[in-house]
Image (cartoon, rainbow, N blue to C red):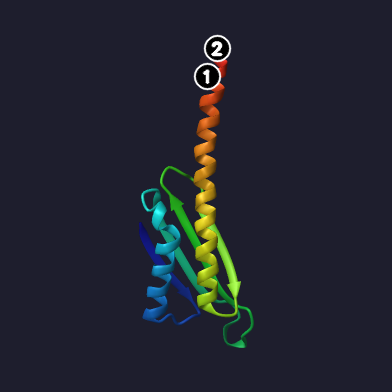
């Protein structure tokens, strides 16, 4: 699983970078064999004005899937945004893979019924 971390108008320390990698490891570790590439973009939307403006966008490209799984989260603190985005992307990837698996089972069921 390749991980890229991009920032926009936000200074990210090494500890925040390590924290992001660790959180994504927890969220996506069980899917490592099907995750091709992960891109994380951290941004400060409003700049120095403050407010709920820390953005975390996670884009996960799965092997064999054309459309990536994308999660966007805004929060007051960057670590809270990372936590919520990692949790959401883990659930979204699980849901995507579950759909793929159950769709395959449906296709086999239709083929076996049609063959009778």
Task: Please state the horizontal and vertical placement of residue 59, each as a whole percent of the image.
Answer: 49, 59
Q: Residues within 10 Å of mark 2 (few under 14, many from 20)?
A: few
How many marks on residues? Answer: 2
Give the residue drawn at x 54%, y 35%: 103
Is 1 situated above or below 109?
below
At mark 2, the secondary structure is: loop
Is 48 situated above or below 54?
below
At mark 1, the secondary structure is: helix
Task: Pick the residue in front: 40 or 91.
Answer: 91
Task: Please state the horizontal and vertical placement of residue 3, each as a whole percent of the image.
Answer: 38, 63
Tag 1 and tag 2, C-beta contact below 8 Å = yes
Q: Could you say which disc has been placed on residue 116 in the image?
A: 2
In the rendered image, the quadrant that contains the C terminus is: top right
Q: Residues within 10 Å of mark 1 (few under 14, many from 20)?
A: few
In the rendered image, the quadrant that contains the N terminus is: bottom left
Task: Please state the horizontal and vertical placement of residue 14, each as a whole percent of the image.
Answer: 36, 79
């Amino acid at each position: 699983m390749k991980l890229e971390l991009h920032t926009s108008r936000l200074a990210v320390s090494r500890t925040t970078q390590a924290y992001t990698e660790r959180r994504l490891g927890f969220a996506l570790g069980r899917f490592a064999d099907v995750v091709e590439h992960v891109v994380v973009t951290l941004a400060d939307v409003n700049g120095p004005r403050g407010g709920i403006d820390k953005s975390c966008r996670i884009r996960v490209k799965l092997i064999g899937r054309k459309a990536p799984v994308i999660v966007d989260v805004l929060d007051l603190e960057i670590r809270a945004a990372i936590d919520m985005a990692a949790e959401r992307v883990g659930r979204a990837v699980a849901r995507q893979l579950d759909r793929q698996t159950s769709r395959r089972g449906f296709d086999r069921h239709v083929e076996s019924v049609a063959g009778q």
